[in-house]
Image: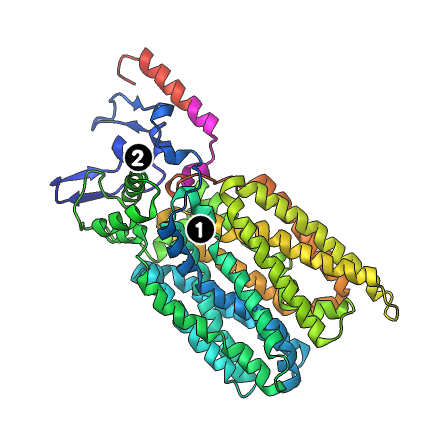
């Protein structure tokens, strides 16, 4: 039984329908255990076993190669997330001046900061269908346009309500960017450097956060009514360059194949693969999933339209296979625990946290946030070089473990300072600063890039855009809840208690990652559904050996 629906597609060169059940079209893992029959039900079943030395080299983890074209494509696509990072960083400082200028309450500030995550749900849910409809590249251009409009509206906002509208629109662009950057980069990247390239969105988010913190520091001395407007309005500039630069990118080869544009896909794969053999192997894998015969070499072929609506969502939520169910739970879990561990409370409210730690001067507050931005950016760069060398699970578990310790240290330091309101405790202040820097460092080295990397590679092609969008929805909802409740939470259970709570959630996340998530390093995107199946490799090998033994001892009939 194939792990996906078998479709018959006519190729003009072959003049006959060709079934995807043919041995030459099966995924490599499925070839080991697949069975073929003739038209008679009682015909002999033949088990195929592929010799180990004949397996394509893409099965094993490949050494990282410097594919400059794929790197450039991934960088351009990932630049959509600069605006998200800039907005996160700049709002942490701008909120101080907005509150003074518009005389709004802490609750209104919570809503202002959190509304972006809520409105991003619209972009996240629409991104999958939009990307399948107009292509990955033009979806990025569309997202850049939304960012531009949102930034201009925020910069010109005459009142709190107008500012909310601008931030709501920006959130829609954030939803689009969160889905499309990871999907496009994963579909362009070769397996040997996919983790490195798919981590680019998180790299640019961190770079954007750093630029946002620097913008706060640079404009802080301007008049109150002007400073925050410039901080927010400057965010429109990257959108212009992004919209123009993306036009130089090629379209995703997987999207091209799904549209029957084989010649165009071959050209892109030839440029983005490490070797000609890998380009051919990737093309065969994509054709297999798209239902195009392997021997079909026409430039353009007719492909059955993929389901955009009920069929895809039904397969994800109502009738998932065991492997799809595990993939979906893995994606939702990793996105949930990334945000539920409190990263946005630290990044968005860092001036407030440092103020509670005993730093009151505005220049010192904003200067300390710049240190947070530098730390995040430095360690995300380290993570990009480790993803394809160390693997996903080791980085994820070590990152989460470090976050637990750092959050506990921050909670301890803030609790001690809370109990000594009139006394100066330099060592406790130092503990808080060190804990925050350690927290963002551990986050950036694993939990930061991992959701986008992991989720963009584990979903089957037919479900990828929608599946990734589900993960982003979970991410944004969780982030919105954390962002819109932090000030109220720390007033209810103290600020130290808030970070102890985040540490507990992070500990639960570590257990989930350890027991449920699989290692995906070096696997091709088309192998993931078998990897997340219910059977282990040893069980599959045992079944193949038993089938071979039965074949040698049988007379040719069941």
Compared with 112, 451 (above or below) is above
Question: First in sequence: mark 1 or mark 2?
Answer: 2
Q: Position of residue 88 (x, y in %)?
A: 56, 68
Prevailing secondary structure of the magenta residues: helix
Q: Is residue 531 magenta?
A: yes
Tell me whether the residue at label 1 lies in contact with that at label 2, contact meaning CB atoms closer than 8 angstroms: no
Q: Which of the numbered marks, if any, corresponds to residue 197?
A: 1
Query: Does any portion of residue 405 appear in the rendered image?
Result: yes
Q: Residue at x 28, y 43 (%)?
A: 283
The quadrant in which the C terminus is found is: top left
Q: Position of residue 270 (x, y in %)?
A: 28, 46
Q: Is 116 placed left or right of 27 in the picture? A: right
Is label 1 in a helix, a strand or a loop? helix
The quadrant in which the N terminus is found is: top left
Q: Which of the numbered marks, if any, corresponds to residue 26?
A: 2
The label nearer to you, 1 versus 2, is: 1
Magenta segment: 528-542
Compared with 382, 237 (above or below) is below
Query: Does any portion of residue 117 appear in the rendered image?
Result: no
The crowding category of the residue bearing disc 1, from other C-alpha atoms within 10 Å (few below 14, some 14 to 19, many at least 20), is many
Q: Is residue 400 magenta?
A: no
């Amino acid at each position: 039984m194939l792990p996906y629906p078998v479709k018959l597609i006519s190729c003009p060169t072959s003049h006959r329908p060709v079934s995807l059940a043919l041995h030459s079209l099966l995924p490599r893992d499925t070839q080991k255990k697949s069975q073929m029959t003739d038209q008679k039900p009682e015909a002999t079943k033949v088990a195929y076993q592929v010799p180990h030395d004949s397996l394509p080299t893409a099965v094993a983890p490949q050494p990282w190669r410097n594919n400059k074209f794929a790197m450039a494509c991934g960088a351009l696509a990932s630049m959509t997330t600069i605006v998200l990072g800039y907005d996160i960083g700049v709002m942490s400082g701008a909120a101080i001046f907005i509150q003074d200028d518009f005389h709004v309450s802490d609750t209104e500030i919570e809503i202002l900061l959190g509304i972006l995550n809520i409105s991003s749900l619209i972009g996240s849910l629409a991104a999958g269908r939009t990307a399948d409809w107009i292509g990955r590249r033009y979806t990025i251009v569309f997202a850049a346009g939304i960012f531009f409009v949102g930034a201009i509206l925020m910069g010109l906002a005459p009142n709190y309500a107008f500012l909310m509208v601008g931030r709501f629109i920006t959130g829609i662009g954030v939803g689009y960017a969160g889905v499309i950057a990871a999907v496009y980069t994963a579909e362009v990247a070769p397996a040997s450097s996919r983790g490195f390239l798919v981590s680019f969105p998180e790299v640019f988010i961190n770079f954007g956060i750093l630029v946002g913190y620097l913008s706060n520091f640079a404009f802080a001395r301007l008049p109150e009514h002007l400073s925050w407007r410039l901080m927010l309005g400057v965010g429109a500039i990257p959108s212009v360059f992004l919209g123009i630069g993306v036009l130089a990118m090629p379209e995703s080869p997987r999207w091209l194949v799904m549209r029957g544009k084989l010649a165009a896909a071959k050209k892109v794969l030839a440029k983005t693969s490490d070797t000609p053999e890998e380009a051919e192997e990737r093309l065969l894998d994509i054709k297999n999933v798209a239902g195009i015969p392997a021997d079909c070499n026409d430039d353009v072929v007719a492909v059955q339209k993929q389901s955009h609506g009920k069929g895809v969502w039904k397969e994800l939520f109502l009738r998932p296979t065991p492997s799809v169910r595990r993939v979906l739970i893995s994606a939702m879990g990793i996105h949930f625990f990334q945000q539920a561990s409190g990263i946005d409370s630290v990044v968005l409210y860092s001036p407030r946290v440092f103020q509670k730690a005993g730093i009151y001067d505005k220049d010192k507050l904003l200067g300390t946030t710049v240190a947070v931005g530098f730390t995040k950016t430095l360690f995300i760069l380290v993570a990009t070089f480790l993803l394809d060398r160390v693997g996903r699970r080791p980085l994820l578990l070590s990152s989460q473990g470090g976050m637990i310790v750092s959050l506990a240290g921050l909670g301890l330091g803030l609790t001690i300072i809370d109990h000594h309101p009139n006394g100066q405790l330099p060592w406790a202040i130092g503990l808080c600063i060190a804990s925050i820097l350690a927290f963002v460092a551990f986050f950036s080295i694993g939990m930061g890039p991992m959701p986008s990397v992991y989720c963009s590679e584990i979903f089957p092609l037919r479900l990828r855009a929608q599946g990734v969008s589900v993960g982003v929805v979970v991410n944004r909802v969780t982030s919105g809840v954390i962002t819109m409740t932090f000030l109220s939470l720390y007033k209810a259970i103290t600020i130290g208690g808030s970070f102890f709570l985040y540490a507990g959630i992070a500990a639960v996340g570590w257990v989930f990652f350890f027991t449920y998530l699989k290692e995906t390093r070096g696997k091709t995107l088309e192998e993931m559904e078998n990897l997340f199946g219910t059977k282990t490799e040893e069980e599959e090998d045992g079944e193949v050996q038993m089938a071979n033994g039965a074949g040698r001892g049988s007379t040719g009939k069941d």
